[in-house]
Amino acid sequence: VELIALDEALRQLAEASPRQAQVIELRYFGGLNVEEMADVLGVSPATVSRDQKVAEAWLGHILS
């Protein structure tokens, strides 16, 4: 049940902010670090860090 809820929350995040969803997927499912994610996404490490913080907060709110 929790995995289904997480999948749905990630789907909703992807609709609202595709890059933030990619950051979460790359970090938690791909195991990439900030610099690696920045290279993959073509953005700065600071942008990746911001996206990750916002996305984690959003997911935490949705899943609570």
Image: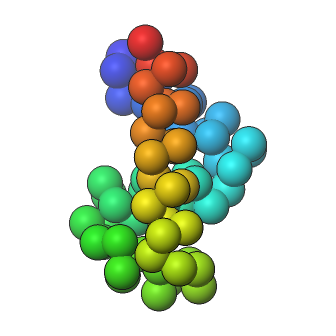
Front residue of 38 and 1: 38
Q: Say above or below: 28 vs 26.
A: above
Q: Say above or below: 25 vs 31.
A: above
The image quarter containing residue 32 is: bottom left
Residue 4: tell me if it is visible: no
Picture residue at 50% right of the left edge, 20% below the top: 61
Q: On the rendered image, what quadrant is the C terminus found in?
A: top left
| Residue farthest toward the front in the current orientation of the protein | 46
Query: How many marks on residues?
Result: 0
Picture residue at 74% right of the left edge, 42% below the top: 16
Q: Position of residue 53 (x, y in %)?
A: 45, 46
Residue 18: tell me if it is visible: yes
| Residue farthest toward the top in the current orientation of the protein | 64
Q: Say above or below: 33 vs 57.
A: below
Residue 62 in the figure: left or right of residue 15? left
Front residue of 37 and 4: 37
Q: Position of residue 41 (x, y in %)?
A: 56, 78
Q: Position of residue 54 (x, y in %)?
A: 53, 43
Q: Position of residue 9 (x, y in %)?
A: 55, 31
Q: How is the image coloured?
A: rainbow
Q: On the rendered image, what quadrant is the N terminus found in?
A: top left
Picture residue at 58% right of the left edge, 80% below the top: 43
